[in-house]
Image: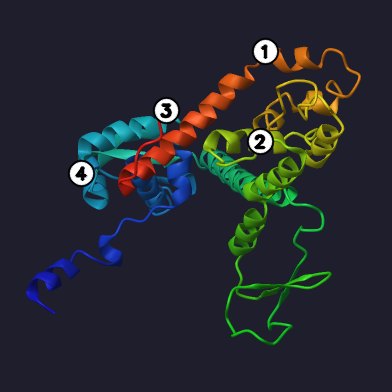
Amino acid sequence: MNDEFLKLKQFIGEHQTLTIPRVFAEMLNGDLSLAIILNQILFWCDKGVNKEQYEFAKTYNELSQETGVSVRTIKRKVKKLKNLGLISTKVKKFNGNPTVYYTVHIVKFMELFNKTLFETNENEKSIVKSSKNEKAEVANGLNDSDKLTLTKVSTCPKRKCQPDTNHIHKNTTEEYIHKNTTEKDIYMQAAEKNKIDYDFYVKKWNDFSKVNGLAQVLMLNNKRKQHLKARLSEKNFDFDAILSKIKQSDFLLGKKGDWKVDFDFVVSPRYINILEGKYDNGTGNARQNVNKNVSIKDEDKAVIQEYKQKLNEKNKEMGFPLIP
């Protein structure tokens, strides 16, 4: 151990450290220097000239040496403690010198102290409750059949896994979890289950469109993902029901004109018109329902243009000719 570190050790340890209860800082709105001075005053209040009245004598210089806070700051902070009603002071002679006598108003102090403790506990409960609510939101996003029924066990029931590993085994009724699996692991797995499988809907649409002569999805861009995600969050959106209605509509299948329904129309807010039967056979205003407030052709052009742009970026990298 070198000499420099030995010198440093002289300034480390219990006698060289100022320690204050965290609640003091909280009750004084985070004013640490004020909390340090209050802590020191409370330390001396039952060791002074009038223990029953929590009164003691202490000069500003003595308080400064004990706390490391400047005399100027101590005077300012003592005034603040007096304004809060926690202490009172008066100057009297002590050993022939003018000295400040401090009196702690213990009842007032305990009122503020208990109030701060109560608010702190309530805040902590609120944080825990908020955390539980966030986890519940994740779990509520799952189907009833997918929700976790958790049984903590010390050993793997299948007896096939290495000990002390985080994993889940699922059987028909329960999820078995190793004892060292954390709550975070569980809810991360729940969140993973709750992710949208965009490819599933694209495949379902492409299989349907191939059979019914509709345009297939070649690229699932961010805009389409956003629209699909928004629709899936709506309780009325039923992808299978929409496909069923399209199959029964000559107009949506393009048998009554040049226009055909496509994936972008299905994942737009206009899907509700399909479910409400506005494009069913025998509905005379089907064309009007499609063209109202929406330009299908412009939307198609935007998708095609974005697709061409991405293809041309790849073609440029590979040295292939660009698509006009």
Task: Check the image and report above or below for 150 versus 251.
Answer: below
Residue on which disc 1 sits: 293
Say whether residue 131 is visible: no
Residue on which disc 3 sits: 83
Which x, y percent locates residue 264?
A: 65, 31
In this rendered view, identify the residue nearer to me: 191 or 225: 225
Type of amino acid at the residue the image marks with label 3:
Asn
Give me the C-alpha separation between circle 1 and circle 4: 80 Å
> Viewer-nearest of labels 1 and 4?
1
Which residue lies at the image location 71% right of the left edge and 31% below the top edge? 266
Sequence-wise, the earlier of marks 3 and 4 is 4
- Looking at the rendered structure, the secondary structure element under dot 3 is helix
Task: Check the image and report above or below for 108 versus 13.
Answer: above
Single out the residue that lies furthest toward the left: 3
Give me the C-alpha separation between circle 4 and circle 2: 87 Å
Which x, y percent locates residue 210?
A: 71, 43
Sequence-wise, the earlier of marks 3 and 1 is 3
Which x, y percent locates residue 17?
A: 29, 59
Give me the C-alpha separation between circle 3 and circle 1: 66 Å
